[in-house]
Image (spheres, rainbow, N blue to C red):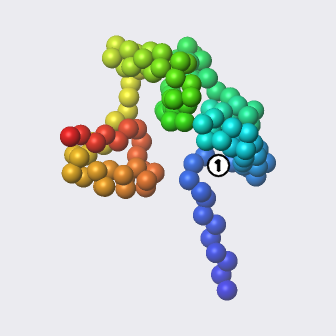
């Protein structure tokens, strides 16, 4: 009987120790503060790998994506100016937003399927 081929999960490869550290950090955050404090930045900081996006810009590095979902409301005073700054940098051409595909609103289901397939490299836009 042939052994089943192992399938690598999506995302960057991580060792078991790193997975355990991230999972423990996520569990601690949810236990202590619930979903209101649960952001990828908070998990990274708790796991010992905090990254401040602004520091990447000054070193002429490329930033491929930032998810602020869980932080927008609880950290509004900090996040709002940061988003405004990013929008100004995009408008001036200093930052580039990678657009992968654009879908009309009528094809919103197809757009979501495409994003969930993890094939997108950049933003997927739904237009009215």
Residue closest to the eye, 89 or 84: 84
Q: Is residue 13 left or right of residue 119?
A: right
Looking at the image, which residue is at 65% across and 81% down? 2
For the C terminus, the image quarter is: top left
Residue 32 image position (x, y, % from top left)? 73, 39
Quarter holding residue 97: top left
Q: Which residue is drawn at 64% across and 66% down?
A: 6
Q: How many labels does the image show?
A: 1
Crowding at label 1, few (<14), some or many (≥20) Cα neighbours within 10 Å?
A: few
Q: Name the side, left or right, on which 75 lies relative to 91.
A: right
24 vs 43, left or right, is right
Of residue 6 and residue 123, the one placed in the foreground of this image is 123
Residue 63: image location, x then y, percent: 51, 28
Q: Residue at image x 40%, y 49%? A: 115
Residue toward you, 106 or 77? 77
Element marked by disc 1: loop
Instruction: Determine whether 45 is above or below 95 in the image.
Output: below
Residue 33 percent across, percent down from the top left:
69, 38
Residue 74 position by quadrant: top right
């Amino acid at each position: 009987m042939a052994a089943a081929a192992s399938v690598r999960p999506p995302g960057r490869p991580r060792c078991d120790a790193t997975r355990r550290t991230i999972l423990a950090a996520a569990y601690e955050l949810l236990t202590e503060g619930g979903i209101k404090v649960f952001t990828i930045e908070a998990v990274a900081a708790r796991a010992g790998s905090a990254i401040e996006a602004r520091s990447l810009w000054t070193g002429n590095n490329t930033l491929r994506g930032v998810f602020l979902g869980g932080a927008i409301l609880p950290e509004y005073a900090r996040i709002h100016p940061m988003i405004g700054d990013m929008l100004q940098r995009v408008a001036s051409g200093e930052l580039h937003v990678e657009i992968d595909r654009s879908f009309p609103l009528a094809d919103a289901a197809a757009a979501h399927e495409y994003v969930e397939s993890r094939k997108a490299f950049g933003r997927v836009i739904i237009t009215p």
